[in-house]
Image (tube, rainbow, N blue to C red):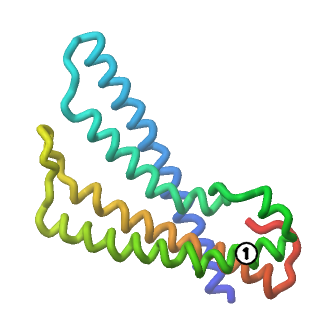
Amino acid sequence: MDGIQKILQFIDALSECTGKAASFLILALALVFCYEVVMRYCFDSPTVWAHEFSAMLFGTAMITSGAYVLRFDGHIGMDVVYNMFSVRGRAILDVITYFVLTLPFLFVLIWFGGGRAWKSLITLEHDSTQWGPPLYLFRIMLPIGALLFFLQTLPKLARDLAVVFGGKTEERG
């Protein structure tokens, strides 16, 4: 069990690290917006790349920070219903939704997103806009983010199962 615990702690640390790294993308996003506003309104010289680049930064930040949010139980839930259950009842509900909703959804993101990213990488796909940035760098972030999210579901599932089968009654997390 000690080896499994170390693996789960490593996954937790990986999620924290990638989440903190993704937070810097938000800073970069703010800088891109500021640059575009200054160029557009102060110098009457809008950029052709700021809108697309900001969408890519935002998308990358969102998909790669999902594991971090899960690590700290920050995803939106139906708290009105969820809080009516005991800690064990919530853990049972989480285990059920993991297998019925989360796992199939992540499988689709990894499988189809990975296929799309692979095709984009092989063809070195570029956007057809005036700026024409490489899309393969952006497309690969979906399966990577989904894989990171999947990895973080493993410690959460282990903690939920410990509550369900171990009778652990204190708060999870």
Secondary structure of the residue carrying tag 1 is helix
Determine whether 69 is above or below 57 in the image. below
Task: Name the image quarter holding residue 45.
Answer: top left
Please tell me which residue lies in front, 65 or 51.
51
Q: Which residue is mark 1?
A: 93
Q: Residue at x 48, y 72 (%)?
A: 105
Q: Residue at x 72, y 76 (%)?
A: 159
173 sits left or right of 97 in the view: right
Q: Among all residues in the image, which is located at the extreme top?
A: 42
Q: Residue at x 44, y 67 (%)?
A: 146
x, y (%) of residue 111?
Answer: 35, 76
Task: Name the image quarter holding residue 142.
Answer: bottom left
Quadrant location of the C terminus in the rendered image = bottom right
x, y (%) of residue 114?
Answer: 31, 72
Q: Residue at x 52, y 65 (%)?
A: 14
Number of on-image labels: 1
Q: Hey, what amino acid is under mark 1?
A: Leu
x, y (%) of residue 88?
Answer: 83, 76
x, y (%) of residue 32?
Answer: 34, 31
Quadrant location of the N terminus in the rendered image = bottom right
Q: Among all residues in the image, which is located at the extreme front?
A: 81
171 sits left or right of 129 in the view: right
Dot 1 alpha-carbon crowd within 10 angstroms: few under 14, some 14 to 19, many 20 or more: some
Please tell me which residue lies in front, 9 or 141.
141
